[in-house]
Amino acid sequence: MTKLLSSLAAFTALTAAASAADLPRRAAPPPVFTPVPVFTWTGAYFGINAGYAFDASDRNTGNTFVVPGGAGGYTVSGAPVAVTFRNRSQDGFSGGGQIGYNYQFTPGSGVVVGFEADAQYLDFGRDRNNAFVNGGIRPGFYATDPRGLSSLDFFGTVRGRLGYAFDRTLVYGTGGFAYGSGSADRSFGGYAGNDSFRTGWTAGGGVEFALPTDSFLNFFRSNAVTLKIEGLYVNLDRGTRNQGAFLIDAASNVPVLYSGVGRRSDEFAVVRAGLNYKFGSY
């Protein structure tokens, strides 16, 4: 009897195992798909830049005036003295910072619009008041020419940007409002025309490339670090301010002689590289 019960139990277990093997197996869940974020230029940014600025004017103006001699004149010999301001190209370092915002219509590749504002230092001071005097001016007097690029110490722009993104590469054009000022225009007192602030326009273009988010340059944990190379042409209108050269009384720092020897246009170009930190969408 015991053997019969044991055999029946074993048969029942084998039958159950065989039935379970015939049941359909539950399919394994599909792997979770995590989409790779598509890069977009949309977002705010700030950064720094540095480059080189150089004269872009035609420099075809006259730059010589005569200091009178005779009794009560301003020359050592008493004879008239010609003062010539060298009309040569000026150039120097430019550097500063910028802030802006971009909007990309379609992530990945597509049209990008935006705006940017910057403020820049200019090193045009090396040739400031650069004059050749054919003779001698009396002690206590000196000639100066506050016109043109030699009087610019800084400039800034507020510009629109329009470009096309090829994923992480952006090619763009830019243009808008420009302004500038300097210290040389105010290097002597008591003269109503020594206001050096001037405004104008600027235009240019560039190319910008976005580095990976984990770039070693990403000190601020931004969505992206971008590098750009940019060129700008800047034209500042001086109006009628300081259109000539001056003979200055060093004791009072006041002009005693003025000569309208022409105008140096404030036209210059800047080629610079920049680094931006972008915040917003990936």
Image (cartoon, rainbow, N blue to C red):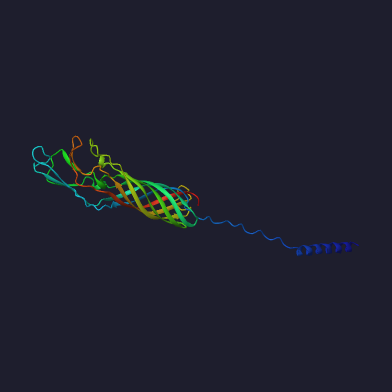
Q: Is residue 275 left or right of residue 269?
A: right
The answer to which of 90 and 57 lies nearer the viewer is: 57
The quadrant in which the N terminus is found is bottom right
Residue furthest right as drawn: 1
77 left or right, relative to 272: left
* Frontmost residue, 84 versus 30: 84
Task: Locate residue 24, reporting x and y percent.
Answer: 73, 63
Q: Please identify the residue farthest to the front as the structure is shown.
A: 239
The answer to whether 60 appears left or right of 25 in the picture is left
Residue 63 image offset from top left, x and y in percent: 19, 48
Q: Quadrant of residue 179?
A: top left
Where does the image place residue 172, in percent across and percent down from the top left? 40, 55
**Percent from the top left, x then y, of residue 256?**
17, 38
Number of numbered markers: 0
Using the rendered view, name the quadrant where residue 15 is placed: bottom right
Please say if 188 is above or below 82. Answer: above
Q: Is residue 116 above or below residue 255?
A: below
Q: Nearer the viewer, residue 215 or 204?
A: 204
Rendered image quadrant of residue 28: bottom right
